[in-house]
Image: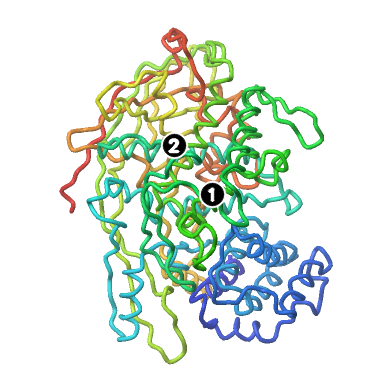
């Protein structure tokens, strides 16, 4: 543990004040004296990766240290991955940390941060290391220009300050009502980390296979989409409409966000038509990709690069579709199906300057940290979500056989406690937004945000097991909006696709009656609040000096919906939802032996179980992911039950 604490301390040092000097004298010395190419026996590849990067550096081809970085820029990405590869090839942590110290001041700051976060997440050497919240490492990407300007002034005048971070825009903009969702720092952290855990550029040669990556791409983003729609309904807005290439982009966006280096993020006015983007794609190309994907869905198969057919008319079809839509390196034919999703992000990011006439930096859509701020993000993802839905609707409906867990009877389900949401103030540290150098005093700088939270509650269920034996059961809990924005009740047919996943876990049911209680804090969809970077630093320093044991186990995962946002916002008089519980056969569903005891990394429902097989063999969203036109199927299935609940919103807090 002491070794781990020391490694953590060095990681903290590397990520603090990223554009300034390393503050820790020991690390600073390493940065100056370490020669990464001197002894290549420290690398698994005998030095291939390090020679490649070092040569680029010697020949002055790397992006300057103080420049914006976008993962969607292929040269920027190539460089970041060179460093990632060096880390991945290290045989020991010492090798990784020395290279970290060496490259920190020799490479672009944002590239460096990306390479460190990604390597720590994927290398076996990163096990046990806690990554500090990204909004405290690179605050520019999570707060707005107004706050940043105030922070600079405060630093210059040596005056500590807490600055209110307002949501972008004014009440003249209807979209403003749900800005708290797209701009939530925890939601953005979840989104960034999902893409760190499942990079579109990932190849299995980096070390392991990312199980059901394509399906997780669909499911994690589907859930962002339906959660956003639920928030809209509670704010008296219609669900998001999909965008389309030959229709206007209805919502404009003024990000009020600044790069640390590179100026303001570009804006986009309302109702503009898509333009071809020089060097990226024509609008026509996007339509061609879409048509090819829709053809694959209609045909029921994907054409692989060698001309063979990959059947998608089955449970695993969605995984392949996710791969081709994103598109990731797992796409069986990127040549033909293109990169619909990734190009769409760039297309949207560039609509303010499609021909590159004004030398604008990338738009918010071109960074996972900032993408969900732009209302067009949800339009884009709704568009892709509808393509996925087309496929799911094309699969045969579930029959009673597909859903039944023989002998299991749910007598009742309900909620203990209150379903109540509220807004609260939350401060985070933005000292790393401003430059710090020897001789300049450190001052406390914080941003203050309003964020959604809810009271803790529990689900309770009475379940009879008539099997005469213990059975392992998979519990699947969803919350589905009951009425649309006009007060018309959703049916299964038009409502099942809008269900919000709340939890999924395994539990043994004894013969006879079982009373099951599950706390909202235990959800495997969510992660707890990360601790502040400074808290992590203090605890690490104490552990290194021998004062306290080092145990941050509960904070390990950064991918996952923030637990405080588990419950969609309610209404003052209650917003009605259907609470659905489905109990299915755990012996069949669970892919791990210790399903009941293991947390599978805590937030496996949208984020998988790191480096391992996804814990649940059923399709994500099961049993609500397909059409079931015959109502009797659900009515007769005693292991699936729903009840109606109301979520209240307490607006007395602000
Ligand atoms: Cu996460 Cu589009 O995939 O932002």
Decide if ligand 1 comes within 8 Å of the CB at mark 1: yes
Alpha carbon distance from label 2 to label 1 = 23 Å
How many marks overall? 2
Residue 100 higher or lower than 497, as above or below: below
Q: Earlier in the sequence, mark 2 or mark 1?
A: 1
Determine the residue located farthest toward the bottom in the rendered image: 439
Confirm whether residue 614 shows in the render: no
- Which scheme is used to colour this image of the protein? rainbow
- Numbered circle sitting on residue 194: 1
* Residue drawn at x 65%, y 60% as measured from the top left: 74
Expressed as whole percent of the image width and height from the top left, the position of residue 588 reads 61, 23
Quarter of the figure with the N terminus: bottom right
Placement of 165 over or under 55, stated as above or below: above
- Residue 487: percent from the left, percent from the top? 24, 25
Would residue 529 be found to the left or right of residue 482 on screen?
A: right
- Secondary structure type for disc 1: helix
Of residues 355 and 647, the one nearer the viewer is: 355
Dot 2 lies on which element? loop
Confirm whether residue 590 shows in the render. yes
- Percent of width and height locating residue 265: 43, 64
- Residue located beneath label 2 in the image: 242
Task: Name which residue lies at 52% across and 28% down.
Answer: 389
Q: Nearer the viewer, mark 2 or mark 1?
A: 2
Q: Nearer the viewer, residue 481 or 77?
A: 77
Q: Position of residue 467 (x, y in %)?
A: 52, 12
Mark 2 Cβ inside 8 Å of ligand 1: no
Q: Along the line of sight, which residue is nearer the eye, 181 or 258?
A: 258
Quarter where residue 326 is shown: top right
Tell me the crowding category of disc 2: few under 14, some 14 to 19, or many 20 or more residues within 10 angstroms, Cα based. Answer: some
């Amino acid at each position: 543990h002491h070794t781990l604490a020391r490694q953590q301390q060095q990681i903290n040092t590397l990520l603090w004040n990223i554009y300034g000097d390393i503050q820790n004298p020991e690390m600073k010395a390493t940065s100056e004296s370490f020669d990464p190419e001197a002894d290549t026996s420290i690398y698994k590849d005998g030095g291939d990766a390090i020679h490649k990067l070092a040569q680029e550096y010697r020949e002055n081809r790397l992006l300057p240290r103080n420049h914006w970085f976008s993962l969607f820029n292929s040269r920027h990405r190539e460089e970041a991955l060179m460093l990632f590869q060096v880390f991945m090839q290290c045989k020991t942590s010492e090798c990784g940390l020395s290279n970290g110290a060496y490259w920190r001041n020799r490479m672009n700051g944002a590239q460096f941060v990306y390479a460190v976060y990604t390597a720590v997440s994927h290398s076996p050497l990163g096990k046990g290391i806690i990554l500090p919240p990204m909004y405290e490492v690179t605050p520019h990407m999570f707060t707005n220009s107004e706050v940043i300007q105030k922070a600079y002034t405060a630093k210059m005048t040596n005056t500590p300050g807490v600055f209110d971070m307002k949501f972008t825009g004014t009440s003249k903009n209807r979209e403003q009502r749900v800005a708290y969702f797209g701009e939530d720092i925890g939601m953005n952290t979840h989104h960034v980390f999902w893409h760190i855990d499942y990079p579109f550029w990932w190849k299995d040669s980096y070390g392991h296979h990312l199980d059901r990556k394509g399906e997780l791409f669909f499911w994690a983003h589907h859930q962002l989409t339906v959660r956003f729609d639920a928030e809209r309904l509670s704010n008296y807005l219609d669900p998001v409409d999909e965008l389309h290439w030959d229709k206007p982009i209805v919502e404009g966006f003024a990000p009020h966000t600044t790069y640390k280096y590179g100026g303001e993020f570009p804006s986009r006015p309302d109702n503009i038509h898509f333009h071809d983007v020089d060097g990226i794609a024509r609008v026509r190309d996007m339509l061609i990709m879409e048509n090819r994907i829709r053809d694959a869905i209609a045909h029921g198969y994907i054409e692989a690069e060698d001309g063979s057919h990959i059947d998608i008319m089955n449970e695993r079809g969605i995984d392949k579709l996710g791969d081709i839509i994103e598109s990731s390196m797992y796409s069986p034919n990127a040549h033909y199906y293109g990169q619909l999703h990734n190009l769409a992000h760039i297309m949207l990011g560039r609509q303010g300057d499609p021909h590159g006439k004004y030398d604008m930096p990338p738009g918010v859509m071109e960074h996972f940290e900032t993408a969900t701020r732009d209302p067009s993000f949800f339009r884009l993802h709704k568009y892709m979500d509808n393509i996925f839905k087309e496929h799911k609707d094309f699969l045969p409906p579930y029959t009673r056989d597909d859903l039944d867990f023989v002998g299991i009877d749910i007598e009742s389900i309900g909620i203990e406690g209150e379903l109540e949401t509220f807004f609260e103030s939350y401060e985070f540290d933005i000292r790393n937004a401003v430059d710090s150098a020897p001789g300049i005093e450190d001052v406390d700088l914080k941003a203050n945000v309003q964020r959604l939270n809810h009271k803790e509650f529990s689900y309770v269920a009475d379940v009879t097991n008539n099997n005469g034996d213990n059975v392992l059961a998979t519990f699947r809990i969803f919350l589905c909006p009951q009425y649309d924005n006009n007060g018309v009740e959703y049916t299964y047919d038009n409502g099942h696709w809008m269900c919000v996943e709340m939890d999924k876990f395994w539990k043994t049911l004894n013969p006879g009656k079982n009373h099951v209680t599950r706390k909202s804090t235990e959800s495997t969809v969510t992660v707890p609040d990360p601790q502040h970077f400074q808290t992590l630093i203090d605890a690490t320093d104490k552990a290194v000096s021998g004062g306290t044991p080092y145990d941050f186990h509960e904070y390990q995962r950064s991918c996952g919906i923030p637990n405080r946002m588990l419950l969609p916002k309610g209404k003052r008089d209650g917003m009605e939802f259907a609470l659905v519980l489905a109990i299915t056969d755990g012996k069949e569903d669970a892919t791990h032996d210790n399903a009941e005891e293991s947390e599978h990394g805590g937030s496996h429902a949208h984020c998988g179980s790191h480096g391992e097989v996804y814990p649940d063999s059923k399709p994500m969203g099961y049993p609500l992911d397909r059409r079931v036109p015959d109502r009797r199927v659900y009515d007769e299935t005693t292991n699936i039950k729903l009840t109606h609940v109301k979520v209240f919103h307490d607006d007395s807090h602000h």
